[in-house]
Image (cartoon, helix red, strand yellow):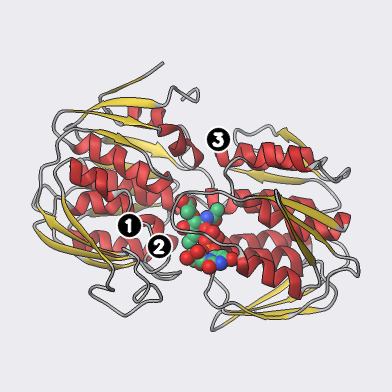
Amino acid sequence: MGLLGDSITIRGGKPLIGRIELKGAKNLVTKAMVASLLGETPSVLKDVPNISDVRIVRGLLEVHGVNVVEGVEEGELIFDPSNVESAHFADIDAHAGSSRIPILFCGPLLHRLGEAFIPDLGGCRIGDRPIDYHLDVLRNFGAVVEKLPSGIRMSAPNGLKGAKLELPYPSVGATEQVLLTAVRAEGITELKGAAIEPEIMDLINILQKMGAVITVDTDRVIRIEGVDRLEGYTHRALFDRNEAASWAAAALATEGDIFVGGARQGELLTFLNVYRKVGGQFEIHDDGIRFWHPGTPLNPVFIETDVHPGFMTDWQQPLVVALTKASGVSIVHETVYEQRFGFVDALVDMGATIQVHKDCLGGQACRFGQRNFNHSAVIVGPTRLHGADIEVPDLRGGFSHLIAALSAEGTSTVSNVGIIARGYENFITKLRLLGADFSTED
Ligand code: EPU
């Protein structure tokens, strides 16, 4: 999609059928790119998807003096950090766009340059998405944090030292912050309450290749022994399991049959269990997973999103579209983000029966229960969706809008689709490959 005009017109009701290929996970690749800053020699990352989040991180690395070039293989990037230098605040701000990744540059830049700047952070509009855990962790390593009107300046006048840390919640980003900082900090770091998502484990693989010493214990404890020097790495990124789950949901919602090349069972176990309970069919192959609609009515389910190994928050939005077609009442309790049901308004406009509630419905009470957040959804089906004009709110919600439009009767115009390119490589080409009927603005 040559960052297309911002809207597409979809003529729905056609099953998506065919094969698409995944590349590396957005939520690993962008962090692996930051890790290249820690090496004394160049790093090679393979299976990098062509998505705008990758372009943002590439731009940020380049303004900090990292030379980034394409390798011989499609999707291969080489990062040479020999000339890392401080960047101007305005350049960082201009390149960061709405990304939250700049916060992860802090540890590596503090090690290399003694200072780091981060602009005001964006990311998808899914709740407040604060950075307090990140700042607390960095302060514990010895960073001095100064809040300025336009962002945050950090310095490490006495270097960074290993620390005993405990996260109040197993945050993915804060765990990565600890890893990227502790590997070169002096002494030992112990992190309790760590997140253990597969993307984090793959980042640990990368850091170990670079020379780091990291132990992952049971019960979410990670120990890191700081080292004086790290080398560059060569690594093929873990596949994008969130994209895999999105296409799997698209197969269900459109009554289609999609082979997702590169998808693997291990990192999708929890998703596959729920998919099977809904009635979705799948077949595991060496080179991917085939997902398809059973041809009979779908079953309602209860889902509670959670940190790994639970059901990922990024999987619920596309699946909710399929649940509007299940016969009965489904419940989705979102426990990771407080406001991740904004996308259902558009589905309701298209004819879905979905209500969102402030209570913790169906399962355990979660930390959002008494705090006035609409974080439980009740979906009553089966409904036939009809076309509508809808606007993409965020990355995963946006993909679910696409699926809804593809499965609806009639024509829909989906605007603001540029956001989807943040995390879904060539999604327009993939939709064409799968036989979708649509036209773009350009
Ligand atoms: N949180 C805080 N303070 C912090 C950091 C997080 O309160 O300083 C809270 C968040 O507000 C949220 C919870 O902790 O309620 C979990 O956030 P986490 O830090 O785990 O999320 P993240 O690192 O910002 C990554 C992915 C998300 C994915 C989550 C959960 C990236 C770039 N983003 O976000 O992916 O949903 O982990 O697995 O890795 C996406 O791909 O669309 C996406 C949003």
Q: Residue 378 at x, y = what percent?
A: 19, 62
Q: Is residue 176 left or right of residue 381?
A: right
Q: Amino acid at mark 2?
A: Met
Foreground pick, 436 / 97: 97
Counting from the top left corner in percent of width and height, residue 399 is at: 36, 42
Residue at the top extreme? 442
Relative horizontal placement of residue 234, taking residue 171 as reference (left or right): right
- Across and down, in percent, residue 246 comes to 35, 48
Question: Relative to 41, does residue 214 appear above or below in the rendering?
Answer: below
Dot 3 or dot 1: first in sequence order is 3
Q: Choose top left, top right, bottom left or bottom right for residue 152.
A: bottom right
Q: Residue at image x 62%, y 49%?
A: 30
Q: Tell me residue 435's x, y (percent).
A: 27, 28
- Label 2, label 3: how many angstroms apart (C-alpha)? 23 Å
Say if residue 434 shows up in the picture.
yes
Instruction: Using the image, tell me which numbered label, if any, was put on residue 383.
Output: none
* Inter-mark Cα distance, 2 to 1: 7 Å
Q: Which residue is mark 2?
A: 312
Residue furthest out toward the right: 158
Helix, strand or loop status at disc 1:
helix
Secondary element at image label 3: loop
Which label is found at residue 316? Answer: 1
Callout 1 amino acid = Gln
Look at label 3 and name its amino acid.
Answer: Asn
Q: Is mark 3 within 8 Å of ligand 1?
A: no
| Nearer to us: label 3 or label 1 | 1
Mark 2 crowdedness (10 Å alpha carbons): few <14, some 14-19, many ≥20? many
Image quadrant containing the C terminus:
top left
The answer to whether mark 2 and mark 1 are in CB contact below 8 A is: yes
> Disc 3 marks which residue?
50
Left or right: where does residue 156 sit relative to residue 398? right
Of the two numbered discs 2 and 3 on the same chain, state the one appearing first in sequence: 3
